[in-house]
Image (cartoon, grey):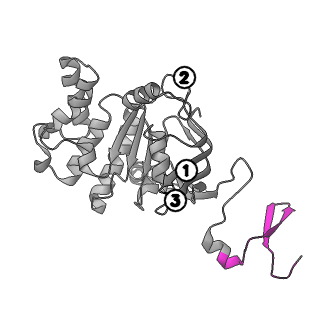
């Protein structure tokens, strides 16, 4: 598959008073065109920092992050000019935030919220009318087009926010905890809608979340720990043998999935062993590696061993 985003040895350092905070510590990540990716991790792991960099809202301190986009003209977000970043944010990226106040303007109707980005981009009246209608139909809210925020539920507001994010026909859709303030049923509906939009409009979608349901909605889940990619989980449709028409229909309506988790090895050959596994196996700050027929054996070094 063709890469859409390539991050290599990505570093981000923030200055807080006299302190320097290392948010990303040499992160590597590749996202293919059309992929729907979930990013998870503990608070402070660097996942929101990564999303801000990919959206052109923040610049990395070092490393490389290249976005190919629909034009296939690579844009290095580290070296891009301010003008190039502005154009990238307006034409290539759509955002859906957790907080409604960042997504929508409360005194505008649902349709007016959707047409506002198009107005700022200089679109004509007919284009705005046709595209806003298509988007609101796609998210199931055309009948609520004249409603303002106070007249919409939290889930409906996020549906409008998704339509707003797609108003300027971006290639990349970024979601920062888009289900964080929703109940579990509504959250699942929003994740399902994001997947539908991903397929219908040929988007590349990246969602940062704490939602445990994310693995069932995306193609791949990447875990970030201490500013680096630690592991990834890939969702696959399970092969199921069925013997009846009813069983086939049930499998097609709701296919069963299985999940394969891998530890990520970066370009320098480093990998992160999860803390619970290190504790259970007694791995400290040194290990020995032994080549075996099945792979590589990682063995803890006991205290006192040379």
Q: Secondary structure at mark 1?
A: strand
Mark closer to the observer (1, 2): 1
| Disc 3 versus disc 2: nearer the observer | 3
Viewer-nearest of discs 1 and 3: 1
Residue placed most toward the observer, 64 or 157: 64
As for residue 283 lying within the magenta part, the answer is yes
Q: Residue beneath label 3, please? A: 45
Observer able to see residue 236: no
Count residues near mark 2 (Cα–Cα under 10 Å), then give few for <14, some for 14-19, many for 20+: few
The residue at the point 54 percent across, 42 percent down is 60
Question: In the rendered image of this protein, does residue 101 appear above or below residue 305?
Answer: above
> Marks 3 and 2: CB-CB under 8 Å?
no
Disc with the residue nearer the chain's start (1 vs 2): 1
Is disc 1 in contact with disc 3, using a CB cutoff of under 8 Å? no
- Label 1 crowd bin: few (<14), some (14–19), many (20+), radius 10 Å: some
Q: Position of residue 26 (x, y in %)?
A: 63, 49
Residue 73 image label: 2
Q: Magenta stretch containing residue 44, yes or no?
A: no
Choose the circle earlier in sequence order: 3 or 2: 3
Q: Nearer the viewer, residue 50 or 248?
A: 50
Span highlighted in magenta in the image = 279-305
Q: Quadrant of the C terminus?
A: bottom right
Q: Secondary structure at mark 3?
A: loop
Using a 10 Å C-alpha cutoff, classify the residue at mark 3 as few (fewer than 14 neighbours), some (14 to 19) or many (20 or more).
some
| Horizontal and vertical percent position of residue 43 | 46, 62
Quote the CA–CA distance across marks 1 and 2.
28 Å
| Sequence-wise first label, 1 or 3 | 1
Q: Position of residue 14 (x, y in %)?
A: 51, 51
**In the image, what residue occupies the spot 62% across and 71% down?**
275
Mark 1 and mark 3: Cα distance apart in space: 13 Å
Disc assigned to residue 13: 1
**Viewport quadrant of the N terminus:** top right
């Amino acid at each position: 598959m063709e890469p859409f985003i390539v991050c290599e040895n990505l570093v981000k350092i923030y200055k807080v008073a006299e302190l320097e905070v290392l948010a990303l510590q040499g992160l590597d990540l590749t996202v293919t065109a059309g992929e729907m990716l979930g990013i998870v991790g503990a608070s402070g792991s660097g996942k929101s920092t990564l999303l801000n960099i990919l959206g052109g809202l923040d610049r990395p301190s070092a490393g490389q992050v290249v976005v190919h986009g629909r034009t296939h003209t690579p844009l290095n977000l580290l070296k891009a000019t301010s003008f190039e970043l502005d154009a990238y944010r307006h034409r290539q990226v759509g955002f859906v935030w957790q907080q409604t106040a960042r997504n929508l303007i409360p005194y505008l109707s649902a349709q007016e919220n959707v047409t506002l980005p198009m107005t700022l981009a200089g679109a004509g009246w007919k284009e705005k009318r046709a595209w806003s209608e298509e988007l609101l139909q796609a998210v199931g809210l055309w009948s609520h087009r004249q409603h303002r925020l106070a007249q919409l539920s939290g889930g409906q507001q996020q549906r409008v926010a998704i339509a707003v994010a797609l108003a300027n026909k971006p290639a990349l859709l970024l979601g920062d905890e888009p289900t964080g303030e929703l109940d579990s049923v509504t959250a699942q509906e929003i994740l399902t809608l994001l997947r539908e939009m991903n397929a219908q409009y040929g988007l590349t979608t990246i969602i940062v979340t704490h939602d445990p349901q994310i693995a069932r909605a995306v193609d791949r889940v990447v875990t970030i720990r201490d500013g680096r990619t630690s592991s990834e989980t890939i969702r696959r449709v399970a092969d199921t043998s069925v013997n009846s028409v009813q069983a086939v229909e049930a499998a097609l309506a709701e296919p069963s999935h299985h999940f394969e988790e891998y530890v990520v090895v970066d370009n320098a050959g480093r990998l992160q062993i999860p803390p619970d596994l290190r504790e259970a196996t007694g791995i400290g700050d040194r290990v020995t590696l032994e080549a075996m027929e099945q792979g590589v054996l990682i063995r803890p070094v006991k205290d006192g061993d040379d």
